[in-house]
Amino acid sequence: MSPSTDHNHNEKAVRLVEYLLRLASLRTKLVRDIADYERILWVSSIPNEKGCFTQAWGRVEDIDLDIWIEVQNQREPELPSVPDRCEDWVERTSLRNKADLPELLSKITTQVENPAWREGTDEPEYISQTERLEDHPEVQRTWERYIEEQWLPWMEEHDRWESVHKVYSTLFAIHQEQIRLGEEYELVLGLGLLTWKTPTGHRVHRHMIAANAFLEFEARLGKFTVRPMPDGAIVRPELDMLDIEERPARAEETARSSLINANDHPWEKDCIEGVLQALVHSISSQGEYDSILETKNIRASAKPVVEYAPALILRKRSAKGLTETLKKIKDSIENGGDIPGEFLDLAEIRPRADPNPDNDPGDTCSEFDGEVFFPKPSNEEQLRIVDKIRAASGVLVQGPPGTGKSHTIANLVCHLLATGQRTLIYCQNAACATGSRRTRS
């Protein structure tokens, strides 16, 4: 191939990458305010009660460092029984109103036998009688003992239970949303809440460091555990909420290098806080850092303020990983590197004499004799797909709902596995199973 042809192919591949970069940026919604995310759990809201733990409180020797948050639901304390003597004087709804001490009614109306009643007369058998609390001092004394010895202790215990249950309910909601929304959304731990009105007039209220989190639910125990993702937390700086001209030069690269000292552990507070301080001071000479665990909800101003304020966040995945990969591919091509095989096909620049050099010879079973291994009924179109897969690096099958795409996939997967091929099944729907395996038939 001539140098001019190589140059033209490189230009075509670069233009394709640039197009994909612009497409990714158009489909990405810039989030400047944490309130726009799907769900948020502030770590400061986790009570220091039985069944709860967070690394934000500091390390504990007998708790694994990979357990970031743990919350186990408790049984709701039962309201203590009202003394029989006070039963008629109590307004039941007031017993669960913990904002005020429950009080007895000042007077009640009771039904008593009518002394003038005789069978066969027009007189009622019972008549109403009004009784006043002040005439029953023993009822008031019994009630005061009940409040002091039973209701107040119950209220304190119920407050503790409620603080745990509130966090548990939030984690349950996050868990349900993850199931519903699927892989399009991600769970991250945010650290270092930046509040700032930028020079361009944008109000920013977002964390500057993120780490990938995994939420585990043990239904039998009623327990939620937050850990790093199986492939790591990938603790990293995030400055995409700032316009390019507002991002300090090389601050993100410097922060990323400094975070290596955290050993991919977001609770290495000395390292994390050092990076946060450096970032806010790089943004503005007025920048301030506060190591507070709970955000003060300050108003955005020209002075950037960063609070430690960790939070667990469910949000839509950004295209940042994709754009970074595309940029690396572009830089590689411009610097004389090889064009990935996938881009050769997409840009239609693969040499005819080299139909698919990237194919792994080991992926094709040399013993395949043309027999098709379809466990389900099939048609000619499905057989044509098998032929195309053998000859091409990619095949697109499309059609409206109900035309048999899932049926076709099931047949193809069985055929590929039976002939020694590798398969990866991916779906945006959480109900779809994913896996990668190699088998021989």
Image (spheres, rainbow, N blue to C red):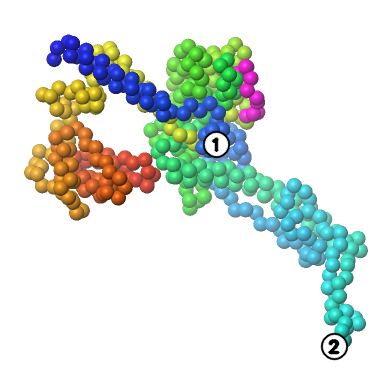
Query: Residue 14, percent across and down?
Result: 29, 18
Q: Is 335 left or right of 248, judged from the image as shown?
A: left
Q: Residue at x 21, y 48 (%)?
A: 411
Q: Nearer the viewer, residue 430 or 244?
A: 244
Which disc, if any, is residue 40? 1
Stretch in magenta: 295-304
Q: Is residue 440 visible?
A: no
Q: Secondary structure at mark 1?
A: strand
Query: Residue 26, percent across and down?
Result: 41, 26
Query: Residue 223, percent across and down?
Result: 51, 47
Membership of 296 in magenta stretch: yes
Q: Residue at x 71, y 53 (%)?
A: 96
Q: Secondary structure at mark 2?
A: loop
Say what amino acid the circle numbered 2 marks: Glu
Q: Taken as a whole, is the magenta stretch helix, strand or loop?
A: loop
Membership of 5 in magenta stretch: no
Residue at the disc numbered 2: 119
Say what amino acid the circle numbered 1 marks: Ile
Q: Nearer the viewer, mark 2 or mark 1?
A: 2
In the rendered view, would you say 206 is above or below 38? above
Q: Nearer the viewer, residue 42 or 59?
A: 42
Give the quadrant of residue 77.
bottom right
